[in-house]
Image: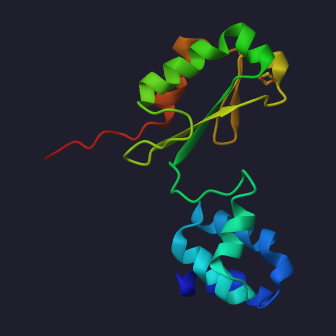
Amino acid sequence: MRERLSPILAPYRRQRGALIPVLQKVQEELGYLPEEAVSEIAFFLGLSESEVYGVASFYAQFRFERQGEHTVKVCQGTACYVRGGRRILELVKRELGIEPGETTEDYGFSLERIACFGSCALAPVMVVNKTVYGRMTTAKARKTLALYRREPQVDG
Ligand code: FES
């Protein structure tokens, strides 16, 4: 971990005020903030681990659990909700077998519920990674998820 993070952390040695940008860069590199990374960050910036956790857990953008390869966000804002967003979320939960805030066992997908994605004209909206899928139906949502599923392993 130290080797992997050194190039990111080196310019910030003992710069306590740089905690947020450092957390962002480390999360960009690793996808989340594992315990080992938090202790490296604390060591480099001259903070305690609990100070780092205290700040990081205040911001919703930071994650302490490994995320799935793909992040599926289903909008539950008013425009999406009244146009069937709830059915889309139910379908995605069923298809992936997880609740919002969870990640599938194979780390293929993480699921999030969002309040408004700012694309209300396309309601109901579902976002996979950075791609926005609008005017969703349950059939379209199922097909969209299929695009991101890992190919099953074929034995021998
Ligand atoms: S309510 Fe869903 S994008 Fe605005």
Dividing the picture into quadrants, the one containing residue 39 is bottom right
> In the image, residue 22 lies at what x, y percent?
75, 74
Dividing the picture into quadrants, the one containing residue 33 is bottom right
> In the image, residue 61 lies at what x, y percent?
72, 53
In the image, what residue occupies the spot 74% across and 16% down?
Answer: 80
> In the image, residue 91 lies at what x, y percent?
50, 18
> In the rendered view, does 150 fall on the left or right side of 139?
left
User: Which residue extends farthest top?
Assistant: 83
> In the image, residue 62 lies at what x, y percent?
68, 57
In the image, what residue occupies the spot 75% across and 55% down?
Answer: 59
> In the rendered view, does 114 fall on the left or right side of 110?
right
Q: Nearer the viewer, residue 18 or 145?
A: 18
Q: Nearer the viewer, residue 32 or 46?
A: 46
The colour scheme used here is rainbow
Q: Is residue 44 above or below residue 140?
A: below
In the image, what residue occupies the spot 78% across and 74% down?
Answer: 19
Q: Is residue 134 above or below residue 34?
A: above
Q: Which image quadrant shows ligand 1?
A: top right
Dividing the picture into quadrants, the one containing residue 7 is bottom right
